[in-house]
Image: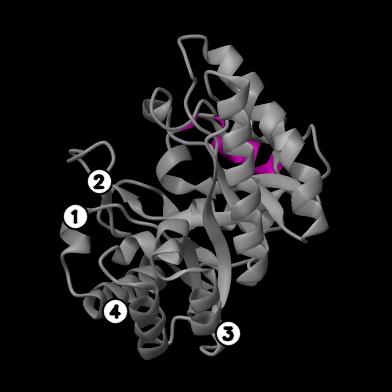
Amino acid sequence: MNHFNSIDRLSLNQITTEKWSLKEAVDGCLRADVPWMALWRHKISEIGLRESKNIIKGSGIKISSVCRGGMFPATTAKLRQVAIDDNKRAVDEAAELGAEVLVLVCGPSAGKDISEGRKMVEEGIEELVPYAEERGIKLGIEPLHPMYAAERSVIVSLSEAVTLSEKFQAKQVGVVVDVFHVWWDHDLYNQINRAKGRILGFHISDWIVPTPDMLMGRGMMGDGVIELRRIRQAVEKAGYGGPIEVEIFNQKIWDTPGDEVLALMKERYLEHV
């Protein structure tokens, strides 16, 4: 199949409609017939876990993931434990809300020693795995673009993420493929193939040229240079048939009425993905 003729797998990642509350986003998805949503923890905390669960439970919307756990590296053992405790809360939230996957944005190094930061990430995941497994939650390591290494994640390639995930059982730890972060990789398709059986999520947007902003510069599908369909087909060939999340950080899109964003998102998904 070269392209979609339905939106059965389409998921609104909440950050794409950042100005909407959880309730507004759920209602928007229902109006647009978008069947899936990915939840962000700051949106859950705005109204609390119980109210979030009530909204989701009564809506019929399916939850593709909760974002985010991670941020493991820290300067002291005490602060590392704070990060682990927060990750356990994130696992609990994912379990309560019916998600199967907690997305891990693993965090920057606590100092200048990036290899030590990577070691802390591995140790953090190792500590979190038994807790997550007990609650039926899989941990999805999302490699970020290398430009985020100092601020958001020391895991900066799909190869690195797969290697890290392979230290654990596939039923517990896998990877999340976000096109914005991995499209540039000369070895991308080999690494997607290598991730077979471990792909827990697939995120889409586009890379605009010129890039307007390092964080807030993602584009709507079709507005940039990413070979979306080819990547999607590779991910499917590697065994992933789950929801496809549209995750866009872009102030212009955030300032656009949510219903318009969802209408455009559906149109571009069918056309380009």
The residues tagged by marks 3 and 1 sit, at their Cα atoms, a distance apart of 30 Å
- Of badges 3 and 1, the one in the foreground is 3
Residue 81 appears in the picture as rendered = yes
In the image, residue 254 lies in the stretch drawn in magenta = no
Tell me the magenta residue range: 185-193
Q: Is residue 94 above or below residue 186?
A: below
Q: Is residue 59 above or below residue 149?
A: below
Q: Crowdedness of circle 3 by 10 Å Cα count: few (<14), some, many (20+)? A: few
Residue appearing at x 29%, y 63% in the figure = 18
Q: Residue 262 in the image: state x and y as whole percent.
A: 31, 76
Asked if the residue under mark 2 is in contact with the one under mark 1, i.e. CB atoms within 8 Å, the reply is: yes
**Type of amino acid under label 1:** Gln
> Which mark is drawn over residue 35?
none
Mark found first going from the N terminus, 1 or 2: 2
The residues tagged by marks 4 and 2 sit, at their Cα atoms, a distance apart of 21 Å
Task: Give the SS element for disc 3.
Answer: helix
Task: Give the SS element for disc 4.
Answer: helix
Residue 197 appears in the picture as rendered = no
| Residue underneath mark 1 | 251
Mark found first going from the N terminus, 4 or 2: 2
Q: Crowdedness of circle 1 by 10 Å Cα count: few (<14), some, many (20+)? A: some
| Residue underneath mark 3 | 57
* Quarter where residue 9 is shown: bottom right
Q: Can you say which quadrant of the picture contains the N terminus?
A: bottom right
| Residue underneath mark 4 | 263
Task: Give the SS element for disc 1.
Answer: helix
Asked if the residue under mark 2 is in contact with the one under mark 4, i.e. CB atoms within 8 Å, the reply is: no
- Of badges 4 and 2, the one in the foreground is 2
Q: Can you say which quadrant of the picture contains the C terminus?
A: bottom left
